[in-house]
Amino acid sequence: MFKFHQMKHIFEILDKMRCLRKRSTVSFLGVLVVFLLFMNLYIEDSYVLEGDKQLIRETSTHQLNSERYVHTFKDLSNFSGAINVTYRYLAATPLQRKRYLTIGLSSVKRKKGNYLLETIKSIFEQSSYEELKEISVVVHLADFNSSWRDAMVQDITQKFAHHIIAGRLMVIHAPEEYYPILDGLKRNYNDPEDRVKFRSKQNVDYAFLLNFCANTSDYYVMLEDDVRCSKNFLTAIKKVIASLEGTYWVTLEFSKLGYIGKLYHSHDLPRLAHFLLMFYQEMPCDWLLTHFRGLLAQKNVIRFKPSLFQHMGYYSSYKGTENKLKDDDFEEESFDIPDNPPASLYTNMNVFENYEASKAYSSVDEYFWGKPPSTGDVFVIVFENPIIIKKIKVNTGTEDRQNDILHHGALDVGENVMPSKRRRQCSTYLRLGEFKNGNFEMSGVNQKIPFDIHCMRIYVTKTQKEWLIIRSISIWTS
């Protein structure tokens, strides 16, 4: 445990680091190191003493002695607990049961354009009747202008009354008195003062939204208020989560833009809400989300393609400036995401670095990469349980390495798993077909194969001098 004077010395050093005006995250990373020591990833109440909490307040460039600020941060020692905010329910009925997924939106008055109603409409229209039973949508009207809030509530209740009555849609507001100081904040990265105020308030808006949603569902996805959804996005998300069972993750990304389509476990929301509040004036929300992921030991981005959410707004909520950003990986029409049931994978090919076999079977944008294979080399998938397969699709090579394909190979399916000291494997195989131009695709597999499938095997039929990338293996089950 750091002593008081040691902590004070550290913060004095960090204050000097903040003087760097170039666009750098050096100062913030220093703050994060101290923050990581506080949290120890899973901080307990006893780890933050009253003196430490006072130090945190003293590190700001302002005297944070207002009652509003102290009221907001008084529970700083309990990062897993809820922030004490009394919300105003603008349109809501009691939530009857916990849902699978909560979709969170925060919205403020824009100088130009208003896309909130279209976003809510897209969420509901792109969901099936069965999917609607598993989602809840929480809209935080975060603008302090009560006339604008009243007008928006009227529009929302008129257009989506049945969803509100069904408990699928809630509209809330966190009162202004719970917000920390928003004027005269540090101008990190030499941003204009009004932009610093805008993005700092936005961090707090999202923190209060996350805090509210912590117990409404198993998972939470963050959207902006100007987003269009892909058809049956919930089903796609559920399949991805199921495919990652047993894998540690903090954030799953279903869009490459900003903080659109970022998915979290609901049990992480209180900690994320506290994190945004602690560093609300340091940097934009999407940057903070990246640091949060890293602090909780998810080193790499886990992003899925095609994207499920698309930015549709033309004017930004900041000053009405133009914002034409689009996610070119977005597909609006329903796409058939594979099931890829649980399995173990192995190969006798020479694997390059960390491009191991499992990466070809993942929904994440990654792949297997091996050195030139020889005749008889195999890439094997052994399923945990026998399955009935409807469709198989295997792609090799990438856009920038178009020759690293399987030039000569076949795909087999097997049965009768035999125990082995090293690994499980099938005793008999049946050939489904050959690869063409590095790819294999077959539908109606269950109509061609008379047995439940225990294994699937990619078999190299001729030695090649080129390396081999297996970009994706997709399996749809009956």
Image (cartoon, rainbow, N blue to C red):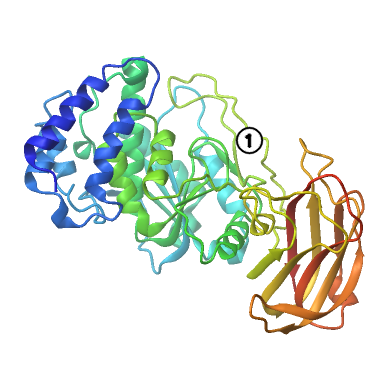
Residue 380, image x, y percentages: 74, 67
Q: Residue 390, percent across and down? A: 80, 70
Q: Residues within 10 Å of mark 1 (few under 14, many from 20)?
A: some
Residue at image position (76%, 35%) is 400
Mark 1 residue type: Asp
Residue 238: image quadrant is: bottom right
Say whether residue 68 is visible: no
Foreground pick, 210 / 294: 294
In the foreground, 310 or 343: 343
The one nearer the camera, 292 or 186, is 292
For residue 321, side relative to residue 399 (left or right): left
- The answer, for residue 459, to whether it is visible in the render is yes
Q: Position of residue 331 (x, y in %)?
A: 70, 44
Q: Residue drawn 88% across and 49% down?
A: 464
Q: Name the residue tied to disc 1.
A: 327
208 displayed left or right of 243: left
- Rendered view: 109 above or below 256: above
Q: Quadrant of the C terminus?
A: bottom right
Residue ID at (15%, 24%): 62
Where 421 falls versus 96 (above or below)? below
In the image, 80: left or right of 129?
left
Number of disc labels = 1
348 to the left or right of 210: right
Locate residue 404, reporting x and y percent. Answer: 81, 44
Q: Secondary structure at mark 1?
A: loop
